[in-house]
Image (spheres, rainbow, N blue to C red):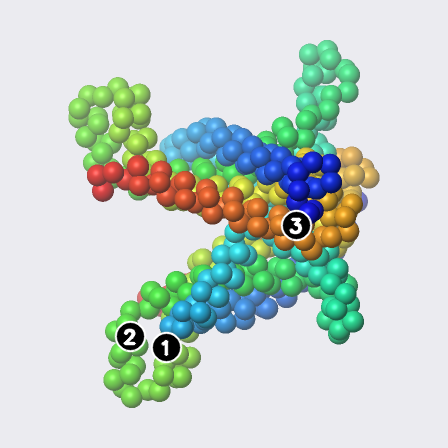
Amino acid sequence: MELLTFGDTGWGDELLYATLMTIAVAVTAMLIGFIFAAIFTPLKLSKNKFLNLLANSYTTVIRGVPELLVIYLFFFGGSGAVMYVASIFGYNEYIEINAFVTGAFAIGIISGAYSTEVFRGAVQSIDKGQFEAANVLGLSKFGKFFKIILPQTLRLAIPNLSNVWQITLKDTSLISVTGLVEIMRQSYIAAGSTRDPLFFYSFAAVLYLLLTFLSMKLINRLEIKYSRGY
Amino acid sequence: MINSFPKLLNAAIITLKLLSVSLIVGLFIGLLFAILRLNKNVFINKFAYGYSYVFRGTPLLVQIFIIYFGLGQIEYLRSTFLWVILKEPYWCAIIAFALNTGAYTSEILRSAFQTIKPGIIEAGQSLGISSKIIFYKIQIPIAIRQSLPAYGNEIILMMKGTSLASTVTIMDLTGVAKYIISTTFKPIEVFIVAGGIYLFMTFIIHNVIKFLEKKYSFNS
């Protein structure tokens, strides 16, 4: 237990900070994923074959390739890509991208592929009559989307999005390979310097369990909120 | 890009070995825990639930690290025959993968067993078939058919999970890909080749499962 005290002798404060980092990466990645889902869900549902193919290849590739490989791509290729873009604008210095940004972006793209599938399924399971009724009422495109389709999509999507959140939360552990100090990386450092890997990795497992447990509680409340009237 | 292809293809064989061994072991673990989950004894029931909750709620990476780095720390284990297995990263990875996929498989099989209509079991009973034969000849075949789509997803997830073996020094497809990236510094090319191999394997698994689903469906 003295290993977990706060201050210079224990690892308590470091691990607390690492836990906050894990939460920060997971939330950022989830939000980036939502942005990707917002772009690709309409493409998936569109009648244009080309746009369809584009969206399908995004979700198929990301869901068929290991997360770790995607992270390595971003870790090793990220700064090169940014430097290439910068060189077009005449900036030739070395640019190093922050590990947080790389990690959140890599996990975000992965979580976005799963979210896209969830939203697609949700939109498709909305009753056709709802679209027709909105048309009959003469709602504008925006009104139709924000007042009729989106609220119903959310209700249907939340249970599956909670799965995506769990996957995203657990995927953040993989960012430790890039050196970002989240739970896994901090446990690795602590295990290395105290030579007590069993304790620290088990403690990391407890922290992850706690995070999944607490977030499930929170999501359940959201689920209740969005299914009022059903 | 072409030079790296044979190396990556060789590494893919290691990935497939890791995957197949852990799936076979995991299937037995999953079946065992699914049966325990359906047990009426509260203690056994809770134990099986706890197992699947812990392994589904923590990242696979933590599980591998606990088994590979953590268990070696226990002095007592070092003196037993288990140490022969636990000092090899390959077996540690397989133990972690099997326990992990076992947890997911137990959930898939449990829900498959629960969706079997009681009428089918009652029909078997009224025909005077013993409960053992009902289990093996009626419940298990139906449960397998029910769980095929979900289990297909689990196989693909597990295939992606085997990439974590590279974190404990195993040169699987991801491990070799990372090595080539860090020596040649061509991340995009290597990603395309390695990712392509992974996608190809996903494609094969997906189609095999689809074929099996068709074969075992009621309509055929």
Tell me the kind of residue under disc 2.
Ile
**Rendered residue at 59%/31% (across/down):** A105
Compare residues B92 and A144 and report the one nearer the observer: B92
**Rendered residue at 29%/69% (across/down):** B117
Would you identify the image quadrant in which residue B205 lies? Answer: bottom right
Q: Is residue B199 above or below residue A25?
A: below
Q: Is residue B72 visible?
A: yes
CB atoms of marks 2 and 3 within 8 Å: no
Of all residues, the one furthest to the top in this rendering is A90
CB atoms of marks 1 and 3 within 8 Å: no
Q: Residue A1 — which label?
A: 3
Q: In this view, does A146 lie above or below B4?
A: above
Q: In this view, does A71 lie above or below A84?
A: below
- Quadrant for the N terminus of chain B in the image: top right
Q: Is mark 2 on a helix, strand or loop?
A: helix
- Quadrant for the C terminus of chain B in the image: bottom left
Residue A108 percent across, percent down from the top left? 55, 34
CB atoms of marks 2 and 1 within 8 Å: yes
Tell me the kind of residue under disc 1.
Ile
Q: In this view, does A209 lie above or below A35?
A: below
Residue A156 percent across, percent down from the top left? 33, 41
